[in-house]
Image: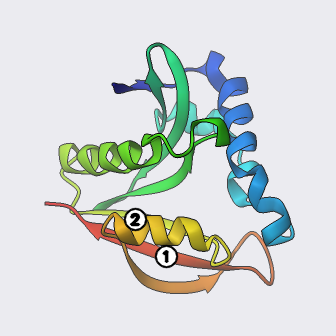
Amino acid sequence: MFHLRLAVKADLGLVNAMTQDAYQPWVSTLGGLPLPMTEDYAPCIARQEVWFVERTGEAVGVLVLAPADKHLTMLSLAVPPIYQGQGVGRWMLDAAEQMARTAARTELRLYTNPGMTRNIAIYQRAGFREIGQRPNPHRPGWMLVDMAKTVV
């Protein structure tokens, strides 16, 4: 049903558009732009950290995964509203977990805004646990919730 495709330089506009669309509903809740909306994805694409989730040749989500020593960090999981509620996000979480296993990482991590309570609940149902909160280094006065899931 779904499959992953690595983003290439020519995909930058689509990555940005899908990310903006996916995170736009959070702007009013958070009182500002979520970090993924301000990210420069060109370096991430160059490092091969950006993946499209496609269904029948159509991009339905964007996944950004960065490697670390013992884990992968999910920097963004973006599903535009038109595709939400169709299992895309859950499939992306499973794919990220599989990618962590394939890369011999023992953990999948992410961080999110504490105001994104719906997303936090989704991550918890998928087996992530909160491992801490910290000030957002890019947004004075904002906090981040760090979450992790052990992969075996």
User: With 152 as the anchor, is 118 left or right in this view?
Assistant: right
Residue that numbered label 1 is attached to: 146
Relative height, residue 51 to residue 118 (above, below): above
x and y percent of residue 89 in the render?
Answer: 46, 47
Label for residue 109? 2
Q: Residue furthest left?
A: 152
x and y percent of residue 144 in the render?
Answer: 61, 77
Placement of the N terminus among the 4 image quadrants: top left
Label for residue 4? none
Count of marks placed on residues: 2
User: With 11 as the anchor, is 129 left or right in this view?
Assistant: left
Relative height, residue 4 to residue 128 (above, below): above
Relative height, residue 1 to residue 99 (above, below): above
Q: Mark 2 and mark 1: span between their CA atoms? A: 7 Å
Q: Secondary structure at mark 1?
A: strand
- Residue at 68% across / 52% down in the picture? 36
The mark nearer the N terminus, 2 or 1, is 2
For residue 41, which quarter of the picture? top right
Q: Residues within 10 Å of mark 2 (few under 14, many from 20)?
A: many
Amino acid type of the residue tagged 2 in the rendering? Arg
Q: Is residue 126 visible?
A: yes
Q: Secondary structure at mark 2?
A: strand
x and y percent of residue 57 in the render?
Answer: 48, 13
Mark 2 in CB contact with mark 1 (< 8 angstroms)? yes
- Residue at 78% across / 73% down in the picture? 139
Q: Is residue 33 visible?
A: no
Amino acid type of the residue tagged 1 in the rendering? Asp
- Residue at 18% across / 51% down in the picture? 104
